[in-house]
Amino acid sequence: MNFLTAEQEMWRENVHRFMEKEVGCEYVQRCDAAREYPYEAYRKVAEAGWLRMLIPEDQGGDGGAIFEYALMCEGLARYGFDFATAFMVSTFTAMNIVKYGTKAQQDRYLDAFMRGKLRFSISISEPSSGSDAASARTRATRTPDGWKIQGQKLWCSGAAAENVVIAMLVRSDPDAKKHSGLSMLLVPNDTPGVDIRKLPTMARRATGTTEIFLDGAIVPEENLLGVEGKGWEIIGSHLELERIAVAAAYVGNAQQAVTDALKYAHERIQFERKIYEFQAIKHMLADMQTAVDAARLLTYRAADMASNDQPCTREVSMAKLFASETLQTITRQGMQILGGHSMLPESNMERYFREGMQATIGGGTSQIQRNIISKTMGIR
């Protein structure tokens, strides 16, 4: 049964054709190998108008639904989750500005974002606060010149690219209770006192994962996003959209991993037979496709509920948990099917595998998702 409308199916196919004809697997592969941000493809996506999707019509966007956005993320991740990250990370913060920004912030940032002239990043984690994000220590102090920031952030995706504004979680009141003393500041990545260093991570090579050192960086008072002391509320809203998007992207990448493994199984001959004819390979491929389909349905359910403003904390965490672990498992099995060829970058499977290993950590670990799910079950 196909749960998509004719229009949704057409949109889904349009994104897949775009990735095949306008971007291509080789381009994604080159960006990964060179650790280069996909500027050319980012421009093409912006010119196609897709960065406008979720922005409300009264703010110059298309006012689209989260479900259609999830379909886009699924398609953009076809040749690698990292590629889709460049667009997803920017959109998360853009939507925070839509929901919490002042009119001046919306006017200043949203049009430039939709035209692809400005990118966003989100910075939550620190060396001492990963899953325990509310333990952030980076300090922001009000001064006559604006907010003065001192500290260090870690695992910030896309912050080193050109023309990026970072939505940064900071501790604005050290005397307040843990969650109450946090605020969100908009910090341009070329601000004096901001030192951004791209990390040589196993995954997320093109979009880039960074650490950020802040030594007296100052941003104007008007760069406060939302209300002072309410940064944790912004993070909670942000993570729901992020986890739906990444779950969809995991599904898109996992499906391509199955497709690549199936193609290889039809081409590779051993013991005078194509290897898909061996029951061990046949059953492995069947299990792989079944898992991808299950992850897709969980993700579509969460996206549909979010599109209809239904409470979906449990469903979002289920989708993120299952889709991330599916990508990790699928790509490991794909490596096994391709054998020695999987170790070569040109096979693409080793890149998918690297992204799969990151999938169960970034955006909230699998263990955190299980904690969230168990709480909704009344297990404290």
Image (cartoon, helix red, strand yellow):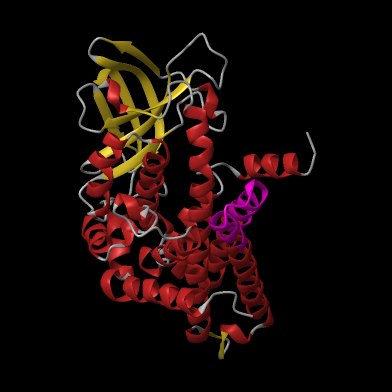
Residue 201 visible to an observer of this rendering? no
Q: Tell me residue 270's x, y (percent).
A: 55, 84
Question: Is 88 positioned to the left or the right of 133 in the image?
Answer: left
Q: How many marks?
A: 0
Residue at the far front in the pictured view: 58
Quadrant (top left, top right, bottom left, bottom right) of the N terminus? bottom right
Picture residue at 50% right of the left edge, 76% below the top: 259
Residue at the far bottom in the pictured view: 272
Picture residue at 55% right of the left edge, 22% below the top: 179
Q: Tell me residue 69's x, y (percent).
A: 44, 60
Q: Tell me residue 323's x, y (percent).
A: 58, 58
Residue 162 visible to an observer of this rendering? yes
Task: Identify which residue, 63 or 16, lies in the foreground.
Answer: 63
Picture residue at 48% right of the left edge, 68% below the top: 340
The vertical placement of 13 against 222, above or below, is below
Quadrant (top left, top right, bottom left, bottom right) of the C terminus? top right
Q: Tell me residue 301's x, y (percent).
A: 62, 62
Question: Is 217 positioned to the left or the right of 297 in the image?
Answer: left
- Helix, strand or loop: magenta stretch: helix
**To which quarter of the image does residue 374 belong?**
top right
Picture residue at 19% right of the left edge, 23% below the top: 192
The vertical placement of 227 against 43, above or below, is above
Task: Identify which residue, 25 or 268, lies in the foreground.
Answer: 25
The vertical placement of 362 against 41, above or below, is above
Question: Is 112 positioned to the left or the right of 250 in the image?
Answer: left
For residue 319: magenta? yes
For residue 344: magenta? no
Magenta residues (range): 301-323
